Image: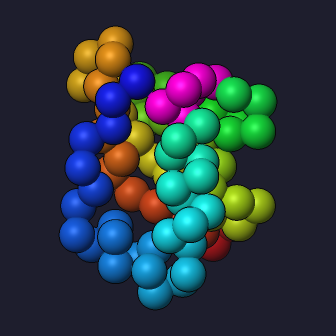
Amino acid sequence: MKILPLHSDIKKYLAKRALDKKFEKQRNLFEINPFYPGLNTELLEPREMKIWSFRVDKKYRALFIFHDKETIEIIDVNNHYH
């Protein structure tokens, strides 16, 4: 699975919250297996918008969209419970 380069705002968000290393670990797992159980990858509601997420840690999730079967773009990282 190919992940497009992160937008600078997302990089800043990760750095500000000291999530850089956690994100990279999860990103590497995602690239090997997007549905690795520890990622808790899921299609979000409303499903017709086709926005997915995977876990960065217990508090944060990365939201992404598929560009094709092999390429995704991370569109946001946010506090899952906020």
Residue, x 71% and y 66% (percent of image)? 59
| Nearer to us in this view, 20 or 8 | 20
Note whether 17 is above or below 52 in the view shown: below
Q: Is residue 34 magenta?
A: yes
Task: Please indicate, yes or no, whether residue 10 appears anywhere in the rendered image.
Answer: yes
Residue that extends furthest to the top in the rendered view of this protein: 69
Q: In this rendering, would 69 be left or right of 46?
A: left
Residue 82: x and y, percent?
63, 72
Note whether 9 is above or below 1 in the view shown: below
Residues drawn in magenta:
30-35
Residue, x 56% and y 66% (percent of image)? 21
**Residue 81 falls in image quadrant:** bottom right
Residue, x 22% and y 69% (percent of image)? 8
Note whether 55 is above or below 30 in the view shown: below
Quarter of the picture holding the N terminus: top left
| Nearer to us in this view, 27 or 54 | 27
Q: In this rendering, would 2 be left or right of 41?
A: left
Q: In this rendering, would 66 be left or right of 41?
A: left
Residue 10: x and y, percent?
34, 67
Residue 58: x and y, percent?
76, 61
Q: Disc count in the image?
A: 0
Q: In this rendering, would 43 be left or right of 39?
A: left
Residue, x 53% and y 41% (percent of image)? 28
Residue that extends furthest to the bottom in the rendered view of this protein: 16
> What coloring was used for the rendering?
rainbow
Q: Is residue 36 magenta?
A: no
Task: Please indicate, yes or no, whether residue 49 appears anywhere in the rendered image.
Answer: no
